[in-house]
Image: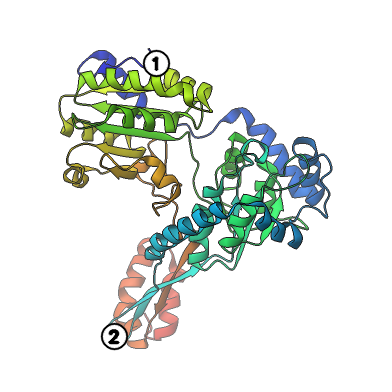
Amino acid sequence: MLITPVDLATSAGEGVVADLLDRFQAADTSCQQVVEEILQAVREKKDKAVVDYGRRYDAPELTVSGLQVDFLELQEAYDKVTPEFQETLSVAIDRIESFHEREMEDSWLQTREDGTIVGRLVRPVDSAGLYVPGGQSGSTPLVSSVLMNGIPAAIAGVNRRVMVTPPAADGSINPYLLVAAQEVGIVEVYKAGSAWAIAALAYGTETIPGVDVIVGPGNQYVTEAKRQVSGMVRIDMIAGPSEVLIVADDSADPAAAAADMLAQAEHDPLALAILITTEKTFCSEVLAELDRQLPALSRREIAEKALRDRGVMLVVDSLEEAIDIANSIAIEHLELMIADPWAQVPHVRHAGAIFLGHHTPEAAGDYLAGPNHVLPTMGTARFASALGVETFLKKSSIISYSQAALKTDGDHIRRLAELEGLTAHGASVTARLNDGK
């Protein structure tokens, strides 16, 4: 049996939930020192270090002059992709752009009768770097990562957007990635991967520009590198393994539930697939479907290991109980495979993305629905949100006092400054009022 179902009202069920609530892991510290050394090497040796690492792990013939994808390679990429792909790409871009355009924030001002003006000025960062993993040496290009990260940056108005991705052994970049990048306005692409790519984006090299924000998924070395440079630059998030939690009642289709559990499990041996159901017999039906569907997967071994090691099936007494547990777990992807999913939406407090009804697979959110698929994991949906336009925006406060306004507020400002022992703060008010206080 791939997964052993447990009843919430048992000690085993309580233990399963306790483990799920304690699943946060800050980072894989096993590679911490190696990443520190890579970051330092790139900071000191710049292009030379990036090329040295690239030759060692990716493309043996990589050169400094070949780090940037040239105009010819960008143009030739269009001849290497199918018309069907370009059609699908166009649909995906339109959906993602349409959704994220609603996220754009406006600057605003607030005026008071005494002449005070306060407000917020919203501006994009100057530059952003998008990391795109190689995807099995370039054979499985992660086009959706280009779209989900590149489109919000464009809508935010980021002037300089660059992409880094590891080259194949022959030094090429998958043409599907290059076409996707160009279609969302990214024409500055560099052949660099892993921690040295993140270092190049953070510190800048002679060829690769330093940026203000770094986004994009990656392996443990990429994640650790982003963690180490965070603070000097903004990063999207420290992401853990992909997660799904399916809440199912007696109206759910076991074949669909099994398919969605497998869709998460095939990501990574550490992926987390959870089923919470009010129907004990439903677990048996889903298990039978898992056994039936698993052999057909191209990533069968990965999916099977993830389900055996981390898969969960939990039986509860009511939908209310299921939603309460889901809120506590704060999952990345929450699927409501129930008869009336909209009735439960007001009760959902913590989830990265919510998928409603029997015809809404999580895969729709990954690729085409429109909302971003870069979502908080490991319980961080309690306080974090999906990547969006705001990831690439910063806000500056605006404050303007008239003489009358400062006179009105002066005593209050000086009183608080005196309480905090900051006499120069109070004096800066007095110098403007010349009232002798």
Specify the label residue 168 is tagged with. none
Specify the label residue 114 is tagged with. 2
Q: Which residue in the structure is indicated by mark 1? A: 2
- Residue visible at 42% across and 58% down? 95
Which quadrant is home to the N terminus? top left
Q: Which of the two discs, 1 and 2, labels the residue nearer the N terminus?
A: 1
| Res 239 seen here | yes
Number of other residues with Cα within 10 Å of mark 2, as a class: few under 14, some 14 to 19, many 20 or more: some
Q: Is the Cβ of the residue at disc 1 closer than 8 Å to that at disc 2?
A: no
| Up/down of 349 relative to 254, above or below | below
Which quadrant is home to the C terminus? bottom left
* Residue 49 occupies quadrant: top right
Expressed as whole percent of the image width and height from the top left, the position of residue 362 reads: 38, 41
132 or 304, nearer to the observer: 304
- Residue visible at 41% across and 41% down? 363
| Up/down of 321 relative to 75, above or below | above
The local secondary structure at tag 1 comes to loop
200 or 319, nearer to the observer: 319
Q: Nearer the viewer, mark 1 or mark 2?
A: 1
- Residue visible at 60% across and 52% down? 82
| Up/down of 328 relative to 346, above or below | above
139 or 108, nearer to the observer: 139
14 or 265, nearer to the observer: 265
C-alpha gap between disc 1 and disc 2:
70 Å
Q: Amino acid at mark 2?
A: Asp
